[in-house]
Amino acid sequence: MLNFLGIGAQKSGTTWLYEMLRHHKTVLFPTGKEVHFWDANLDKGIAWYDSLFAGEENGKVKGEITPAYAILPPNIISDIYHHYPHLRLIYIIRNPIERAWSSALMALERAEMTIEEASDQWFMDHFMSRGSLLRGDYEDCIRRWRSVFPSNQLLILRYEDIANNPNPLLSKCFFHINVDTNVAEYISYEKIKEQIFAGPSYPIRPILIKFLSEIYKPKILSLSEYLKTDFSEWLLVHS
């Protein structure tokens, strides 16, 4: 049976989280990392999806992580709740300015373009695409999932803690999915500090920093108010 879902955000450390969780002796990913059932494979049917997590493993919890799930529409989220009302959800959020830049660099790589070939306008068009804007609107994503699932079933983690506080982050995650929280028992410090699936890294052009800041400043301030958490450092990083 499916016990937990990692729902995103894209370019926010979900591959790292997958690699860490799969080292826990009571966590299983029967399908690997991304199934994309709820966003791209609904035609296969819920019986097919259920079959991926079938079988009784004593004391094991089963999950999958597909970052695209964060932006699912309310009717699909309701379907998930109907089938799995006790599902535990994990959502990692990252400075949306950096997330948008990282996503654009990934798109650049997939288009087989170099950074020099991409104009400022090319990046701006990507930042303004529906997919990029949806993925960076964390408050909207959280509100949609919380409108269906009880708030305590959605664990919100911060991308910065992967580098700064990985052990407490993992311990919190383990507790949330109801497995032993002793991180050191399953994962070495060296493993935790490894970079997993790091994408291309280039500094954001100043004109693009300004463009992204104008998009995300109101969203960051609103998210701070909604979650009662100070995210102002996200604005200071690129000021």
Image (cartoon, rainbow, N blue to C red):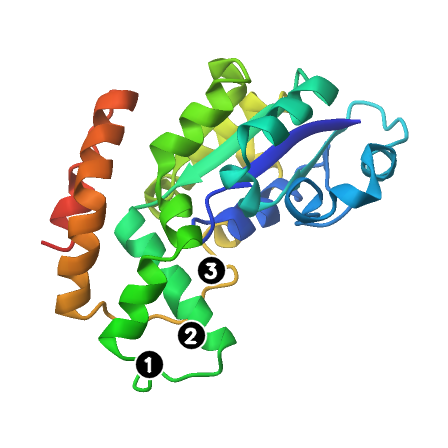
- In the rendered view, does 206 fall on the left or right side of 197? left
Percent of width and height locating residue 107 = 45, 69
What is the spatial separation of the Cα atoms under label 2 and label 3, in whole angstroms? 21 Å
Q: Are marks 1 and 2 in contact (CB under 8 Å)?
A: yes
Of callouts 3 and 1, the N-terminal one: 1
Q: Are marks 2 and 3 in contact (CB under 8 Å)?
A: no
* Mark number displayed over residue 115: 1
Residue underneath mark 3:
195
> Dot 2: few (<14), some (14–19), or many (≥20) neighbours within 10 Å?
some
Residue underneath mark 2:
108
Q: Which residue is drawn at 13% across and 68% down?
A: 206
Q: Are marks 3 and 1 in contact (CB under 8 Å)?
A: no
What is the spatial separation of the Cα atoms under label 1 and label 2, in whole angstroms? 7 Å
Quarter occupied by the N terminus: top right
* Mark number displayed over residue 234: none
Q: Which residue is drawn at 24% across and 37% down?
A: 219
Mark 1: amino acid:
Ile
Mark 3: amino acid:
Gln
